[in-house]
């Protein structure tokens, strides 16, 4: 069974304390073969998975342009979203080309960082929560996202279970916006629906590999790039000063 990047992250950083994990510490440069498209250890063995990370870079450019057009002062948490989206794309590109443990760590950390900062910005800008409670909630979300996969069976849903905390968080934010009758509730709802489709194609990458050797993981990149873009633009609307 191919190792989970999250488990490898815990092993490499020494955060997994079980005897089994201490015996199975891996090298940061160890090769990882996790996706249907990859057939060997070469740099371009996942060309479609690698190139479709342009989805995140395109989204980062769209959000950056939107940020540059605003006529009010934006908080740093909102202004940081475009570069973090770009970092997600770049680190995912490295993972799908180099396919090493350290690239997997970088890939997972940038996703986790984006999720935490987005939640913090949402709480502060949309929900009006003060900074300290928002920061505490964001840190707790990060911890839950990091440790939740360990509670799931190995390889469950092709490791897509690691994204369940993100889905729960998005559903909660969408429900809150709907309860407050915010215009952005529909946008968040659409993003949730798109994210669910993305989870399906990510989960099916190995299952459908025999029928579709290219795999379906590249669609995860395309769809989640759209999800991040839509969510960031919606949060930008929430950060607008009251008129």
Image (tube, rainbow, N blue to C red):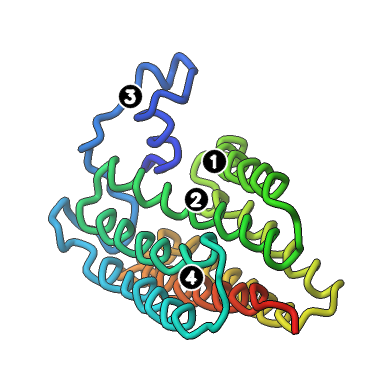
Question: Disc 3 or disc 2, which is closer to the eye?
Answer: 2
**Residues at marks 1 and 4 touching, judged by CB atoms closer than 8 Å:** no
Alpha-carbon span between mark 3 and mark 2: 22 Å
Residue that badge 4 annotates: 224
Query: Picture quarter containing residue 243?
Result: bottom right
Q: Residue 112 bears which disc, if any?
A: 2
Q: Which secondary structure lies at badge 4?
A: helix
Q: Which secondary structure lies at badge 3?
A: loop
Residue that badge 3 annotates: 25
Q: Residue at x 28, y 41 (%)?
A: 102
Give the x, y percent position of residue 19: 45, 14
Vertical order, 136 against 11 (above or below): below
Question: Disc 3 or disc 1, which is closer to the eye?
Answer: 1
Answer with mark 3 or mark 2, whichever residue precedes in sequence. Answer: 3
Residue that badge 1 annotates: 146
Alpha-carbon span between mark 3 and mark 1: 18 Å
Q: Residue at x 47, y 75 (%)?
A: 223
Q: Which secondary structure lies at badge 1?
A: helix
**Residues at marks 3 and 1 touching, judged by CB atoms closer than 8 Å:** no
Q: Residue at x 34, y 23 (%)?
A: 24
Give the x, y percent position of residue 241: 68, 77
Answer with mark 3 or mark 4, whichever residue precedes in sequence. Answer: 3
Give the x, y percent position of residue 151: 62, 36
Which is more toward the observer, 78 or 147? 78
Answer with mark 3 or mark 1, whichever residue precedes in sequence. Answer: 3
Alpha-carbon span between mark 2 and mark 4: 14 Å
Crowding at label 3, few (<14), some or many (≥20) Cα neighbours within 10 Å?
A: some
């Amino acid at each position: 069974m191919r190792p989970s990047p999250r488990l490898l992250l815990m092993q490499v950083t020494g955060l997994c304390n079980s005897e089994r994990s201490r015996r199975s510490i891996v090298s940061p440069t160890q090769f990882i073969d996790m996706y249907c498209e990859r057939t060997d250890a070469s740099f371009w063995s996942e060309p479609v998975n690698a190139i479709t990370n342009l989805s995140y870079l395109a989204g980062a450019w769209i959000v950056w342009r939107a940020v540059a057009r605003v006529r009010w002062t934006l908080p740093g948490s909102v202004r940081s979203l475009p570069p973090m989206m770009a970092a997600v794309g770049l680190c995912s590109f490295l993972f799908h080309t180099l396919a090493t443990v350290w690239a997997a760590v970088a890939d997972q950390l940038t996703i986790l960082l984006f999720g935490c900062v987005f939640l913090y910005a949402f709480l502060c800008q949309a929900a009006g929560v003060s900074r300290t409670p928002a920061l505490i909630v964001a840190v707790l979300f990060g911890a839950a996202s990091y440790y939740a996969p360990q509670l799931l069976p190995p390889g469950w849903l092709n490791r897509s279970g690691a994204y369940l905390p993100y889905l729960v968080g998005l559903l909660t934010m969408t429900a809150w916006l709907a309860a407050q009758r915010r215009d952005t509730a529909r946008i968040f709802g659409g993003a949730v629906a798109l994210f669910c489709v993305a989870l399906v194609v990510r989960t099916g990458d190995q299952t459908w590999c025999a029928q579709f050797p290219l795999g379906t993981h590249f669609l995860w990149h395309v769809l989640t790039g759209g999800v991040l873009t839509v969510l960031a633009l919606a949060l930008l609307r929430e950060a607008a000063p009251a008129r």
